[in-house]
Image (tube, rainbow, N blue to C red):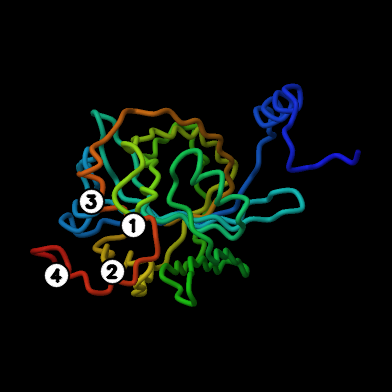
């Protein structure tokens, strides 16, 4: 009988797949990182409990071209600085990916807010342009000119916060209590250059990062890096507390009706 590929895999095949996944080589990416200070009330407004604002209202955009063998990937994220249980990290609001393969694993395993989108990083001499776009809207665009090399930093551990959940099958709430995930990334950089330029945020009803305006640009670089990641469940969170924020994970056109946070400009 010809093997039915949707059929059950043997224990040996499952073990081999798991071991192969744990021995992945370094995969390098070329990317732009922009960090800016934003409106503190706006940053606080996007953080679901138990996450709390960090000491500075920072927003970070990563826009990268990942050199997967035979399968180049565009990968990006927009995240805000946050704190949980005394640990500082980043809470990503949206993570555009150009391929479904990268999207599915991150959403299902870690709870990453990944969505299919367009991610481009282009360099022409000293000129660099990096864009995150979805639904025909380039909602983040970074334009810069390389004005000198920077010493590559030492390898560093970085922390991201995700919420992993499944919406209820009856359309109400969740199937079970959501979990807060701590995702630790070990990052190595082999090349880094400073950019002089700007970050443009365009309004989108699906990816409203324009609500986190650029008050002061803190960092703008282009470089080559590789990372790995491991996650752990930090604990269960209140379904009632998280429910008002789950629209962040989906394309909710009702966001265009949302007013700005009270006190914002």
- Which type of secondary structure does the marked residue at label 3 adopt? loop
Compare marks 2 and 3 and give the one earlier in the sequence. Answer: 3
CA gap between label 2 and label 3 equals 22 Å
Contact? badges 2 and 3 (CB < 8 Å): no
Q: According to the image, label 2 marks what residue?
A: 255
Q: Nearer the viewer, residue 49 or 4?
A: 4
Query: Which residue is at the far bottom?
Result: 136
- Do callouts 3 and 4 mark residues in contact (Cβ within 8 Å)? no
The circle drawn on residue 265 is 4
Give the Cα distance between marks 3 and 4. Answer: 15 Å
Q: CA distance from mark 2 to mark 4?
A: 18 Å
Of 37 and 109, the residue lying toward us? 109
Camera-side mark, 1 or 4:
1
**Residue 114 spot, x, y in % from top left:** 48, 53
Q: Nearer the viewer, mark 3 or mark 1?
A: 1
Q: Is residue 206 visible?
A: yes
Of tags 2 and 3, the one toward the viewer is 2
Q: CA distance from mark 2 to mark 1?
A: 9 Å
Residue that carries the numbered disc 3 in the rendered image: 57
Asked if the residues shown at circle 2 and circle 4 are in contact, with their CB atoms under 8 angstroms apart, the answer is no
Q: CA distance from mark 1 to mark 4?
A: 22 Å
Q: State which quadrant residue 142 falls in.
A: bottom left
SS at mark 2? helix
Marks 1 and 4, the one that precedes in the sequence: 1
| Residue at (34% x, 37% y) in the render | 176
Q: Position of residue 129 (x, y in %)?
A: 52, 68
From the viewer's perspective, is 146 left or right of 35? right
Of circles 2 and 4, which is in front? Answer: 2
The residue that mark 1 highlights is 248
Viewer-closest of 27 and 136: 136
The answer for how far apart the CA atoms under marks 3 and 1 are is 19 Å
First in residue order: circle 2 vs circle 1: 1
């Amino acid at each position: 009988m010809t093997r039915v590929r949707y059929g059950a895999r043997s224990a040996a095949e499952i073990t081999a797949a798991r071991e192969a996944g744990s021995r992945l080589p370094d995969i390098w990416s070329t990317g732009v990182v922009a960090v800016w200070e934003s409106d503190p009330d706006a940053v606080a407004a996007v953080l679901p409990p138990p996450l709390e604002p960090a000491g500075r209202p920072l927003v970070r955009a990563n826009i990268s071209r990942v050199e997967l063998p035979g399968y180049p990937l565009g990968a990006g994220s927009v995240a805000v600085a946050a704190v949980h249980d005394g640990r500082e990290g980043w809470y990503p609001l949206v993570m555009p990916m150009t391929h479904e393969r990268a999207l599915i694993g991150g959403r299902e395993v870690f709870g990453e807010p990944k969505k299919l989108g367009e991610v481009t990083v282009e360099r022409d001499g000293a000129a660099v342009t990096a864009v995150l776009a979805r639904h025909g809207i380039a909602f983040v665009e970074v334009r810069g000119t390389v004005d000198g090399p920077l010493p590559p930093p030492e390898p560093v551990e970085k922390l991201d916060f995700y919420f992993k959940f499944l919406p209820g099958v009856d359309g109400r709430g969740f199937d079970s209590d959501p979990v807060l995930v701590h995702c630790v990334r070990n990052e190595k950089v082999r090349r880094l250059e400073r950019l002089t330029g700007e970050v443009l945020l365009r309004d989108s009803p699906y990816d409203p990062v324009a609500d986190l305006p650029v008050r002061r640009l803190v960092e703008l670089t282009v470089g080559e890096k590789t990372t790995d990641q491991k996650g752990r469940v930090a604990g269960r969170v209140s379904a009632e507390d998280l429910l008002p924020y789950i629209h962040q994970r989906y394309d909710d056109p009702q966001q265009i009706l949302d007013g700005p946070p009270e006190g914002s400009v």
